[in-house]
Structure formats: C-alpha cells, structure tokens
Image (cartoon, rainbow, N blue to C red):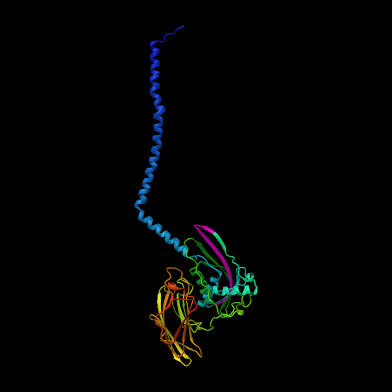
C-alpha cells in the first residue's frame, strides 16, 4: 500500500533539512572557534598584565641593578665576618696575641679531646718524625685530636664549629677589654659560657670561659694561610715522647734577639708592622702601624764598649728623642726580622730596610719566614757599617 506525501509534508521535511544544515556548522565549527577565542582572550589578558609588569621592571632597571649589587656586597660583607677555615694552632696564637694586648693571663682548661698538643713548624715536625722512626716510637696517642664539627648550610658552604675552654686571671679593666676584644674581633667567635669571680682586695677577676669559633668554607672563599712559629729554644714539650729533638744535633745558632721587626698579614690579630726591643714587655719602645702598604725603616745603632742605643725611624714616626738604651757585653747585636706568608693579591705589606751600624760590634740581621721571590716582604736598600744579613728561608735581598 503506497502512502502519498502531501506537498505540505514535503515542505516541512525540506525545512528541517535546511535547519539542520544551518545549525550543524555552529556545533561542529563555530562553537569550537568561540571556545578557542575565549581561551585566547584569557591568555591575552594574562600576557598584557605580564607585559605591564615587565615594562615597570624596565623603567626601574637601574634601581633593581643597584639593589642587586648592594645585596651582593652585603652577602660578601656577611661572609667576611667568618674565616674560611681555622686550625687549632691558630687559636693558640690568637690567645697569645690577646695576652700581649690585654692585661690578662689565659690558661688552657680543655682543648679538643684534652690531648697533649704540640704546636710545631713543618721543619720541626719532620725532625720529630725522623727521631720517632729511628727510635721506633709511636706518638700518635699524644697528638691532639680534631673534634670540630661540620654542617652543610647550603649555597655551597660548610659551617665549621669548634669550642675551646680556658681559665683566666685578669685585672678588672683587662677583663672588660678582653670581652670587648672577643666581641669586635674580625673572625666570628663568641663567648658561649663564662664564670667570673672578683676579688676586691686584689682587684683581680678570675674564672673560666668557653670560646665557640665559627668558619664558613666553600668555593670562592680565600684559602686559609697560617704559618706556625719556628721554635728553636730546645724541646717544645718535655712531657711527651715526641720531643726527641734533644737527641739530635740541630745546626741552628742560639742567640737572644736584641730588637725585632715583624710583618703580619693585613687582617692578623697583631698590627701589620711592629718594631721594638725584644725584651720590652711594656711595649713602650714599640712603633707600629696597621697600614696595608710598603714602608721604609732605618735602624741606627750607636755606642761602644758595651753601652749602646738604637733609633728606628719609619717616615716621620721615630724614637730619636728617646733612643732605646741597651747593653751588650759580648757578641753581635742581633736584629730579628720576622715575616709571614702573604694573604693574597690584596696583601701589600712590605718593608725596605736600612741598617746603620755605628758601633764597635757587628749587627746581625736574621730574616725569618720571608716568602721567596716576588712574594718576599723584606728587602735591604743600603746597609752601612759592619752588618751581616742571614736568611732562615731564602729570600730576596
């Protein structure tokens, strides 16, 4: 049976086909395009905001660069408060220098594992090892143990921490000066524990304290340089087995220096330049300077028949009005010139020396621990009279 489709139905079918053809592209194409457009509008809004932010940065570029440079300087300043490393010998030298500057006596109470400690130079250490090997001794148990702590603090740096305990006797003023000395010291250290007892009758303070040292080591930090003193007045510690030097002939002249000149690194505990009479514990005969520069000194010795005077002049600084009087019954007049390793390219401490000998004795100048070649600190520029210069380490004349 065949059903005829009316003209009206045909028109409705055609209308539906036209509507479908018109609507389907919207769902298949137009809707997707509109959604992408919304996404692009959102991204564009974010990019416009970022553009405005970057334009603001560009306008303030100089300010930001200046602030960045200031932060770099501040970071270096903070790092500069910490040494790049330390060792136990340097702490002993530190307290020795503190006693010279301040009216305080320091006594070791505990150091590391409280083992017997020997502070020796490299040459002495070699001699000790030779004697121990020859005598079949083993003194490792007598050497101090390192009990410092290390901690990774980020940024490529490792924090070193060590504590040292001391007892002390001091005048009241010396006690206050010592506290201030630790507080303002260039290397980072604090008094983490302190006891003090004051005697009004004696005017003395005594007690114990603990020093905590801090250091930061890492890439780019200056190398730690320390030159132990070269002791040659016999064995350094008669109570330990490692002091067999007394069994070995040491071909070193024994003498007591009459005067000294010392050159230190610019940031050392002592001034960069010090000169004076070796026996003057009051330091009244000293002249000194902490300038990181080259200096010229003229040392003049006069007198005869056992009675002599010394005058030393550095620029306008001299003791001509109060020459140092001293006696010498026999032998030469000895002047020690004590140098040290350079801390780096910024270490400019040097000395041109002129020795004028107008006495009836020879003046012997002993240069010690002066670096070789271009690194040498001490040079002689025209001695007169009977003057002999001797080098413990080869240097530049």
Judging depth in this view, the residue of 5 and 219 nearest the camera is: 219
Residue 133 place in picture, x, y as percent? 62, 72
In magenta segment, residue 377: no
Looking at the image, the residue that sits furthest to the top is 1
**In the figure, is residue 32 to the left or right of 250?**
left
Q: Does residue 331 appear anywhere in the picture? A: yes
Where's the C terminus, which quadrant? bottom left
Residue at the image position 54 percent from the left and 63 percent from the top:
160
- 113 with respect to 332 (left or right): right
Q: Residue furthest left?
A: 59
Give 244 or 45, whichever is nearer the viewer.
Answer: 244
Residue 212, how many percent across, how many down? 55, 67
Q: Is residue 371 above or below residue 305?
A: above
Name the spot of residue 246 as percent of width and height, x first: 61, 79
Q: Residue at x 39, y 57 (%)?
A: 67
Q: Is residue 153 magenta?
A: yes
Depth check, front residue: 49 or 36: 36
Relative side of 319 to 89, left or right: left
Residue at image location 54% in from the left, 68% down from the top: 87
- Farthest-out residue, bottom: 305
Relative to 95, say whether 324 is above or below: below
Judging depth in this view, the residue of 229 and 105 nearest the camera is: 229
Task: Tell me the magenta residue range.
Answer: 152-171
Q: Dominant secondary structure of the magenta stretch? A: strand
Coordinates of residue 256 in the picture (x, y in percent): 52, 84
Q: In the figure, residue 355 lies in which quadrant? A: bottom left
Residue 121 appears in view: no
In the picture, residue 344 is in which quadrant? bottom left
């Amino acid at each position: 049976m065949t059903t005829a489709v009316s003209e009206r139905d045909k028109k409705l079918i055609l209308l539906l086909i036209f509507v479908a053809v018109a609507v389907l592209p919207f769902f298949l194409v137009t809707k997707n395009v509109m959604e992408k457009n919304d996404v692009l509008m959102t991204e564009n809004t974010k990019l416009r905001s970022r553009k405005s932010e970057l334009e603001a940065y560009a306008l303030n570029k100089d300010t930001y660069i200046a602030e960045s440079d200031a932060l770099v300087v501040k970071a270096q300043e903070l790092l500069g408060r910490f040494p790049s490393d330390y060792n136990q010998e340097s702490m002993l030298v530190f307290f020795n220098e503190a006693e010279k500057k301040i009216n305080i006596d320091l006594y070791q109470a505990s150091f590391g594992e409280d083992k017997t400690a020997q502070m020796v130079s490299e040459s002495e250490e070699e001699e000790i090892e030779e004697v121990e090997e020859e005598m079949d001794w083993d003194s490792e148990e007598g050497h101090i143990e390192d009990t410092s702590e290390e901690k990774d603090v980020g940024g490529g740096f490792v924090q070193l921490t060590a504590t040292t305990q001391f007892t002390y006797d001091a005048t009241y003023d010396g006690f206050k000066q010592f506290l201030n000395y630790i507080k303002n010291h260039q290397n980072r250290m604090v008094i983490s524990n302190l006891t003090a007892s004051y005697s009004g009758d004696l005017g003395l303070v005594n007690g114990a304290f603990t020093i905590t040292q801090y250091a930061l080591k890492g890439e780019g930090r200056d190398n730690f340089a320390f030159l132990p003193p070269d002791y040659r007045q016999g064995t350094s510690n008669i109570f330990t087995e490692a002091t067999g030097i007394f069994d070995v002939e040491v071909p070193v002249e024994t003498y007591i220096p009459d005067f000294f000149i010392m050159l230190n690194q610019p940031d050392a505990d002592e001034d960069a330049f010090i000169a004076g009479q070796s026996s003057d514990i009051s330091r009244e005969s000293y002249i000194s300077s902490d300038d990181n520069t080259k200096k010229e000194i003229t040392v003049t010795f006069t007198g005869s028949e056992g009675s002599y005077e010394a005058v030393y002049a550095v620029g306008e600084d001299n003791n001509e009005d109060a020459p140092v009087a001293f006696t010498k019954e026999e032998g030469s007049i000895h002047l020690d010139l004590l140098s040290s390793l350079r801390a780096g390219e910024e270490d400019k401490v040097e000395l041109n020396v002129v020795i004028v000998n107008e006495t009836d004795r020879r003046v012997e100048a002993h240069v010690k621990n002066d670096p070789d070649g271009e690194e040498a600190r001490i040079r002689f520029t025209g001695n007169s009279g009977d003057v002999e210069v001797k080098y413990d380490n080869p240097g530049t004349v």
